[in-house]
Image: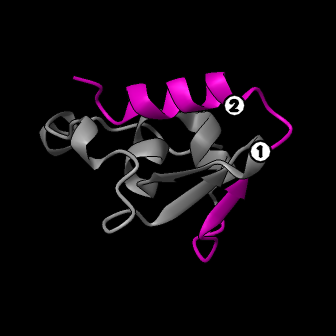
Amino acid sequence: MPPKLNHSPVLLGINSKWFNNQASSDIEVHLENDKVLHCHRLVLCSWSEVWATALEDKKETSLDLTAHDPAIVEMCAVLLHGYD
C-alpha cells in the first residue's frame, strides 16, 4: 500500500526557486535529449503517489523517464515544487 500523502506547512512553503537547483537537489530526473531535471525526493514523494512508488528505493539518485513526454514530466515536477 502506498504511503499516505502528507502536505505539511513546510512543504507548502517550498517554491519554484528550489526546482532544478543542482546544489540542493537529491534526485535527477533524466528526460530525452539528455535533459536532466534536478528535483527533491521529499517534494515529489509527498505530493504524488506515482513519484513515491517510482522512488521507493532510497539509495536511488536518478530516475530515467526518457520514455515519457518530457514536457509533461517537467510540467509535473515544476508544479509539485510550487510554481510561483
Residue neighbourhood size for the residue with mark 2, other residues' Cα within 10 Å, grouped as few (<14), some (14–19), many (≥20): some
The image shows residue 55, relative to residue 46, as above or below, that is below
The question of residue 72 being in magenta is answered with yes
Bounds of the magenta segment = 57-84
Task: Determine the image quadrant of residue 9.
Answer: top left
The front one of 42 and 15 is 15
Which residue is the site of mark 1? Answer: 33
Q: x, y percentage for residue 55?
A: 62, 56
Question: Which quadrant is the C terminus positioned in?
Answer: top left
Q: Residue at x 64, y 64 (%)?
A: 62
Whether residue 48 sits left or right of residue 29 in the image: it is left
- SS under mark 1: helix
* Amino acid type, label 1: Asn
- Could you say where residue 50 lies in the image, as x and y percent from the top left? 64, 36
Q: Position of residue 21 (x, y in %)?
A: 34, 56
CA–CA distance in space, label 2 to label 1: 9 Å
Query: Is label 2 in a helix, a strand or a loop?
Result: helix
As drawn, is 66 to the left or to the right of 6? Answer: right
* Residue 39 belongs to the span the image colors magenta: no
Image check: 10 left or right of 68? left
Q: Give the residue drawn at x 27%, y 36%.
A: 16
Residue kind at label 2, given as amino acid type: Pro
Say if mark 2 contacts mark 1, CB within 8 Å. yes
Q: Nearer the viewer, mark 2 or mark 1?
A: 1
